[in-house]
Image (cartoon, rainbow, N blue to C red):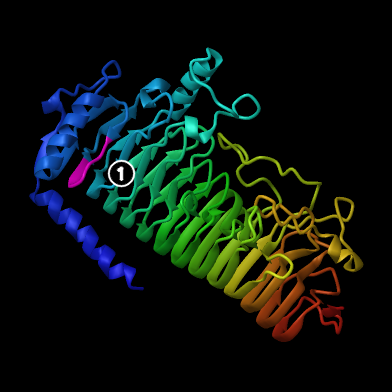
Amino acid sequence: MKILPYLFILSLFFSKASAQSKSFNIVDFGAKSGLQFSNSKAIQKTIDAASKAGGRVIIPSGQFVTGPIQLKSNVELYLSDDAELLGTVNRLDYGKQRVSALIYAKAQHNIAITGKGTINGRGAEVVKNLLLLLHQGILTDETWVVKRPSESNRPRLIAFSNCEDVSIKNVTMKNSAGWVQDFVNCNRLYIDSVTVESTVYWNNDGIDIVNSKNVRITNCNIDAADDGICLKSEGSPGICENIFVANCIIRSSASGFKLGTGSYGGFKNIKVRNITVYNTYRSAIALEAVDGGFIDGVDIEGVTAKYTGNAIFIRLGHRNKTSEYSSIKNIRIAKLKADIPNAKPDAGYPLEGPLPKVPPHNLLPASITGIPNHFVENVILEDIEITYGGGASEKVAHIPLDKLDSVVENEAGYPEFSMFGELPAWGFYVRHAKGISFKNIKLGYKTSDFRHALVFDDVSSINIDGLQIEKGENPHQIILKKTEKVSIKNLKLPFNTKDAVKELP
């Protein structure tokens, strides 16, 4: 992948630059440790001085409170081992009309945040102050009365836009009131060995990459109440291109690794290697194009999903109001092992995922779904093992074979694996797709499930080679409805039956 050598050079650049550049300690510019002091002006003066000369701004050991600060070109913000940069808890310090992030940068280059210290947004305290200001009428918000204060009223921890040659390394980021890290229209971004601990309020994605290219995210440990690592294409639509994610551990009360939901532009050349997703409410892997954009070229290999709500969710929808339709093609997911419990995977965490707003349903399968006349194309799943909790009951919900059309299309619905309600399969559900390959797939469940293992509906060019189904109470393991060009070989079923594969008109 062409992106990798360049980003390796980029990492070397930052390590050499920090060793050779001049250091600027914020204490020398008037900063004071302690919760009673505000250091916004002192830290900004230090950054301004470092930007002129090119150098490192040092946050020394201790607690330093600050309001929003702007990172500038040729500056490395370095947090010493025992340093904690604390966001002010006064919501008005972040701006009245347009909220600012705690650390922001616009159209800058050669910038970095490094060191083993901590950036703590104190998001719970910020929101508490925000609610007070809203009740007093000092601030306004369109959504807080019916739901919660909007994201535009809650400061992010880091927000960089239109920046080049960015490095974020080793730091711990905690307790954001909104998204933890937001990178928009950035080029050559390197995030390594970052720890995210942010579960104190809603909409606090661990890492958001928006319309950016040449990005490398490695060795990160993320615990977020919202999506762990999320790629988006929104705002002024662009594309996310040349993205590499590897060796990350993710816990989320939403999805682990996700493309979308914002999908107005597109996603191209996305590679993921060796990630662990655990105790995650929604999907370990979610690939979603629903706003008229495209997904083309996603290669994911090496996923361990422990106690997650869903293993794989691939969705082409039509949420946008225009005549443009999304497209999804050329997807490969390999060497994935998942444990899907018949329980709420994030139960007990500070902010749990919401209960589905759909009729009662049994445990849901992995799914690949397009919409009528708009197909998910060319998906390869290989070396996949998924174990479900089982426990399905016809008393909860049941879709017989002559009622498969009763599964709602929900073309404009918010994309998530529960968006269809009950599904007729326990292992995989595939609808409106072309060119689907299953290679060396192993499916099983722990307790009983009366449904079919796999259901294909309006799917052409199906290639199944090496499918093992460990358990099965239904004599019809594979359902083919309105399918063509089907190749099935090397089946291993719990019992032999000529009706294992059933074709429907």
**Which residue is tagged 1?**
106
Q: Which residues are magenta?
A: 70-77
List x then y, in percent, for residue 87: 35, 28
List x then y, in percent, for residue 38: 27, 20
Q: Residue at x 33, y 51 (%)?
A: 193
Q: Is residue 130 found left or right of 281 in the rendered image?
A: left
Q: From this view, report whether residue 458 is shown above or below residue 208.
A: below
List x then y, in percent, for residue 354: 66, 40
Secondary structure at badge 1 equals strand
Foreground of the two, 102 or 64: 102
Foreground of the two, 295 or 264: 264
Q: Is residue 38 found left or right of 236 in the rendered image?
A: left
- How many marks on residues? 1
Q: Is residue 465 found left or right of 99 in the rendered image?
A: right
Q: Residue at x 23, y 48 (%)?
A: 111
Q: From this view, report whether residue 443 is shown above or below residue 172.
A: below
Determine if the magenta segment contains residue 220.
no
Q: Residue at x 48, y 15 (%)?
A: 138
Amino acid type, residue under disc 1 in the picture: Lys
Q: Furthest-top residue in view?
A: 136
Q: From this view, report whether residue 194 is shown above or below residue 299.
A: above
Q: Residues within 10 Å of mark 1 (few under 14, many from 20)?
A: some
One can see residue 90 in this view: no
List x then y, in percent, for residue 401: 88, 68
User: Quadrant location of residue 4?
Assistant: bottom left
Foreground of the two, 448 or 408: 408
Q: Residue at x 72, y 86 (%)?
A: 485
The N terminus sits in image quarter: bottom left
Foreground of the two, 459 or 184: 184
One can see residue 178 in this view: yes
User: Quadrant location of residue 347?
Assistant: top right
The C terminus sits in image quarter: bottom right
